[in-house]
Amino acid sequence: MRSKVFWFAVLAAAVTLAVAGCTESVPGRARGSTAPASSTTGGAAITVATMHVTLPEGMHYTKTSSGDSLDGCLTAHSVTCAARMLDLRAASGDPQFDAPSASRPYGWYTGSGAPRCVTPSTPPGAGPAATGSTVVQRGFAPIGPKTADYARWHVTCTDPAQDSEIRMWWLPVSKILVLEYASTPALDQQIDRILAGATFDQ
């Protein structure tokens, strides 16, 4: 009888260990998933031009989207486009290209037409028209081993409740633009942490 109890205990322990092994959390995978890590979900590395960054859990990257409205967007929890990472190498070859710059009121905006306000509930291109954009901070900031042109704008909207701040990092040689929409202290820390860990091919 004692030997049966002993073997039942061994079997139960083995099953417990097997189940634990099957549900181990792996970065970039859902708990219990055996699928390969996605290149667009939290915990996975993504590549933008020559830049490589790792997303935190809870963040999703959209490389391309229908209509281009969410290209390069980082979705954070319920925020459709909390930030954007764009490869502007092809765009910069266009004679009409207006490079991002802290010396322009709308220097963070690279689209055509009137800039639109971007808020947690309104992704790029879907919000109301911006009525003003004032530089409140400018200088340089690191992206991994590189130094980016950096600026922060206070952006006003037709609806004052949607006024916000936008942060920009621009690497003029690599032609990589990073934007953070509707800046908050928590999101600032998250984006700063992502960029601090960036690596580059060259």
Image: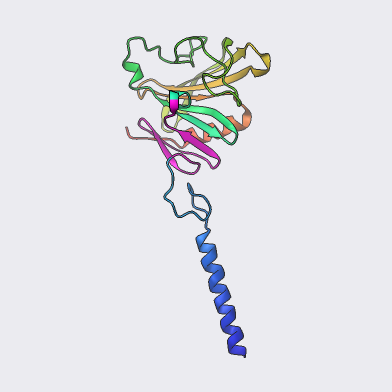
Residue 185 as seen in the image, left or right of residue 150: right
User: Residue lying farthest bottom?
Assistant: 1
Q: Is residue 167 left or right of residue 145?
A: right
Quarter of the image that includes the N terminus = bottom right
Range covered by the magenta-colored residues:
40-66
**Residue 58 on the magenta segment:** yes
Residue 121 or 135: which is nearer the viewer?
121
| Residue 186 sits above or below residue 7 on the image | above
The residue shown at (54%, 71%) is: 15
Identity of the residue drawn at 51% across and 67% down:
18
Which residue is depicted at the point 45% across and 39% down?
A: 40
Name which residue lies at 44% across and 16% down: 100
Q: Is 202 located above or below residue 161 in the figure?
A: below
Q: Quadrant of residue 130?
A: top right
Q: For residue 89, what is the image quadrant?
A: top left
Residue extending farthest to the right is 161
Place of residue 27 in the rendered image (x, y in percent of width and height, measured from the top left): 49, 49
Q: Position of residue 175 (x, y in %)?
A: 37, 22
From this view, report whether residue 191 is shown above or below residue 162: below
* Rendered location of residue 134, percent (x, y): 57, 11
Q: Position of residue 143 (x, y in %)?
A: 45, 30
Residue 56 highlighted magenta (yes or no): yes
Q: How many marks?
A: 0
